[in-house]
Image: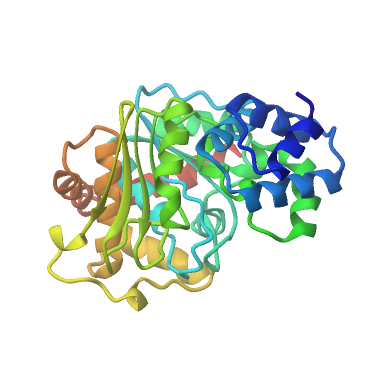
Amino acid sequence: MTFTNNLNKIIAGQDLDQDSSASMLMDIFSGNIAEARIGAFMAALATKGETFEELAGAARAMRRKATRVQALSEKVIDTCGTGGDASGSFNISTTTAFVVAGAGVTVAKHGNRSISSKCGSADVLEELGVNLNTDPEIVEEAINETGIGFMFAPMYHGSMKYAAKARQDCGIRSIFNMLGPLTNPAAASCQLLGVYAPDLTEMFARALKLLGVNKAFVVHGHDGMDEITTTAPTRVSELNNGTIRSYDLDPLEYFENYADIKDLKGGGIKENAAITRAVLEGEKGPKRDIVILNSGAALVAAEKADTIKKGIALAEKSIDSGNALEKLEMLAEYTRENG
């Protein structure tokens, strides 16, 4: 079916199957669609509401066009979220990535510059000494030799340039804002994925299932954060080998009190980089707590722990042994020397 026929279906309020969604995105990513029609597609789909099949189909097309990275480990995790939660928090998922790597799990972190915070994962990693402008081959080597690598999204998804102007001109949140965590160039087999709205947790979990991910926690805090929060319960859709279970996770199961959201705030690039380093150096407090909680879930997703409580213990050990900080230093050194 042609792009126009599929667009008319969306405008009429009809859902697309995976193949039709993938076909539309392949047309866009091949540079065959005028900007006005891309804008119409974005607006019509956002108005109708995206389905998990449409999301999976779009992600499949984007993966097909991406520059791929070959991670050798059987278990590879990504902690990339959608962003867009407007919480102004420090870079929790980025800090978590080093803690998880320090616990012995291979991490292929996918990310970009700022969306919801004053600095995104790429911004803070650059400030911490990681060279973002390394060829994919070097990032692949870093993942396989040091156990962690960062894939700066624009270097792997060049075909997104065909949608860039339409996205800028429209200025709306669209399916393109959802695709980052679903299009890991290393095809991560497990994920901790934060989303910007509670009704997206199950939709993303179902999309991940279609995309072949084995285990994942898709999360949204009741305080609005796209993380497992410590200020309130978190909505979780857990994917476990084809089965999806949705529930609320209460941080009081692991900590004595709820945190105050102001204690999780970040700032500019330098401040957020300093927070990440301080947590990895062992500084105690609410910022460490939210990192070890998210790391605990990530370690369950990677089958390094069978409960979040055990995962938290491994996360604390990763930090307190110096392993988490060492992973940051190894990645920074590797990308500087080989970039």
Q: Nearer the viewer, residue 185 or 124?
A: 185
Residue at left offset 44%, top offset 60%: 91
Q: Nearer the viewer, residue 280 or 13?
A: 13
Number of marks in picture = 0
Residue at left offset 57%, top offset 42%: 179
User: In the picture provided, is 250 more to the left or to the right than 152?
Assistant: left
Q: Nearer the viewer, residue 37 or 268?
A: 37
Q: Please, is residue 33 above or below residue 144 in the view?
A: below
Q: Position of residue 169 (x, y in %)?
A: 80, 58
Q: Position of residue 114 (x, y in %)?
A: 58, 60
**In the rendered view of the protein, which quadrant contains the C terminus?**
top right
Q: Please, is residue 269 above or below residue 124 in the view?
A: below
Residue 66 seen in the figure: no
Residue at left offset 33%, top offset 75%: 263
**In the rendered view of the protein, which quadrant contains the N terminus?**
top right
Q: Position of residue 243 (x, y in %)?
A: 30, 30
Which residue is situated farthest in the front direction here?
12
Residue at left offset 71%, top offset 52%: 43
Q: Position of residue 137 (x, y in %)?
A: 59, 28
Picture colour scheme: rainbow
Residue 309 seen in the figure: yes
User: In the picture provided, is 248 more to the left or to the right than 58?
Assistant: left
Question: Residue 67 falls in which quadrant of the image?
Answer: top right
Q: Nearer the viewer, residue 213 or 243?
A: 243
User: In the picture provided, is 133 more to the left or to the right than 269?
Assistant: right
Q: Please, is residue 211 above or below residue 238 in the view?
A: above
Question: Residue 61 falls in which quadrant of the image?
Answer: top right
